[in-house]
Image (tube, grey):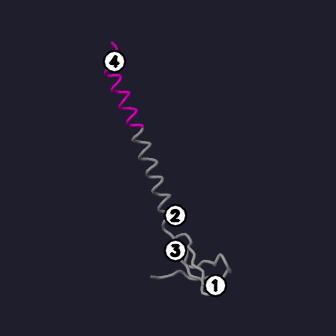
């Protein structure tokens, strides 16, 4: 005995909505992780050439992109 046609339409609709929900959740989580990694940066100030620059989180010292002098991070 085959199920009713309206039941199959509702089932397919729910599967499509579930697929869209899963894709939304996956891409939202992925984009949040990428955004947080880009957002969390440390500021540096070169004492030799007075240049402000940033580096990724987790570095205590970084060379200046202009002159190459190694500087410590800014502390606010």
Q: Secondary structure at mark 1?
A: loop
Sort mark 2 into few (<14), some (14-19) or many (20+) by Cα contacts within 10 Å. few
Q: Nearer the viewer, mark 4 or mark 1?
A: 1
Question: Which residue of the protein is positioned furthest toward the top in this rendering?
Answer: 1
Q: Quadrant of the N terminus?
A: top left
Q: Quadrant of the C terminus?
A: bottom left
Which residue was labeled with disc 1? 49
Q: Nearer the viewer, mark 1 or mark 2?
A: 1
Residue at (65%, 83%) from the top-left corner? 69
Mark 4 in CB contact with mark 1 (< 8 angstroms): no
Which residue was labeled with disc 4? 5
Residue at (63%, 87%) from the top-left corner? 48
Q: Secondary structure at mark 2?
A: helix
Sort mark 4 into few (<14), some (14-19) or many (20+) by Cα contacts within 10 Å. few
Where is residue 29 shown, x and y percent of the image?
Answer: 44, 52
Mark 1 in CB contact with mark 2 (< 8 angstroms): no
Q: Secondary structure at mark 4?
A: helix
Question: Is 12 covered by the magenta stretch?
Answer: yes
* Predominant SS of the magenta segment: helix
Residue at (60%, 87%) from the top-left corner? 47
Q: Nearer the viewer, mark 3 or mark 1?
A: 1
Where is residue 9 shown, x and y percent of the image?
Answer: 35, 23
Question: Which residue of the protein is positioned furthest toward the bottom in this rendering?
Answer: 48
Question: Is 15 covered by the magenta stretch?
Answer: yes
Q: How far apart are the two marked residues, 3 and 4, measured between alpha carbons?
A: 59 Å
**Which stretch is magenta?**
1-19
Q: Which mark is residue 38?
A: 2
Which residue was labeled with disc 3? 42
Where is residue 36 shown, x and y percent of the image?
Answer: 47, 62
Q: Which mark is residue 2?
A: none
């Amino acid at each position: 005995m085959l199920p009713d046609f309206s039941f199959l339409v509702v089932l397919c609709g729910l599967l499509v909505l579930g697929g869209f929900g899963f894709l939304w959740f996956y891409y939202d989580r992925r984009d949040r992780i990428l955004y947080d990694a880009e957002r969390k940066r440390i500021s540096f100030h070169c004492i030799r050439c007075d240049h402000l620059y940033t580096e990724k989180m987790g570095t205590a010292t970084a060379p200046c992109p202009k002159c190459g002098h190694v500087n410590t991070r800014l502390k606010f």
